Amino acid sequence: MAGLVTMSAADREAVLTATIARWASSGCAAFPCGLEVWRYACEASGAEVTALPPHQSRRQMSALLKREGGLVAYAGKLMTSLGWRAGNMAYAPRRGDVGVVNLGGMGLTCAICLGESQYPGIGNWMAKGDGHVLTAAAPRLAIWRLPCPRP
């Protein structure tokens, strides 16, 4: 485990705000969801952004996820390696959480929570995919949260 959780809440918010601005002003690769969310998770954790296995086609992505036990399992392995804690479905999504969500038009994807939506227990999520950024209220299959920073 990384043991890097030392950023203050204000620093984490700055990372999230910078991520939102970067996503809004940059193009989208064909399969960016995991890569862009990974970058955010590393930055919010204070960890160096390391490369993920290549997945430049649907075939490569499918093979990778099959080897890793699916998207939730693979994302969980990566997130916990940075010190993020897996939540349960009782958690209300919070701004800055990372999740695997079911976004209409995209299906299952990795996303960053922008905060709670008007629907109880449903977060507003931001994801990149196939040429666009999508923000929407969506149900989650899994959620990870950074623990409170330790002094």
Image (tube, rainbow, N blue to C red):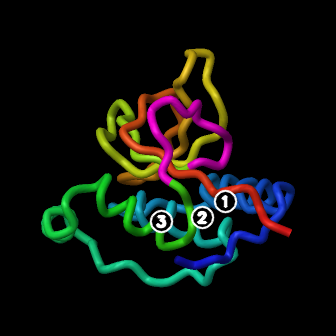
Quarter of the rendering occupied by the C terminus: bottom right
**Residue on which disc 2 sits:** 40
| Foreground of the two, 22 or 52 | 52
Q: Which mark is residue 19?
A: 1
Q: Residues within 10 Å of mark 2 (few under 14, many from 20)?
A: many
Majority secondary structure of magenta residues? loop
Mark in front: 3 vs 2: 3
For the point 57% across and 17% down, which residue is it?
Answer: 120
Disc 3 marks which residue? 80
Q: Is residue 38 above or below residue 126?
A: below
Q: Earlier in the sequence, mark 3 or mark 2?
A: 2
> What's under tag 3, amino acid-wise?
Thr
Name the amino acid, label 1.
Thr
- Residue 22 appears at what percent x and percent y? 66, 61
Type of amino acid at the residue the image marks with label 2:
Tyr
Locate residue 7: give its quadrant: bottom right
Which element is circle 3 on?
helix
Local crowd size for mark 1, using a 10 Å CA cut-off: few (<14), some (14–19), many (≥20):
some
Q: Residue at x 65, y 69 (%)?
A: 45
For residue 136: magenta?
no
Q: Which residues are magenta?
A: 86-97
Task: Tell which circle, 3 or 1, labels the residue nearer the N-terminal end.
Answer: 1
Mark 1 in CB contact with mark 2 (< 8 angstroms): yes
Rounded to the nearest whole Å, what is the CA distance between mark 1 and mark 2?
7 Å
Which of the 4 quarters of the picture holds residue 10?
bottom right
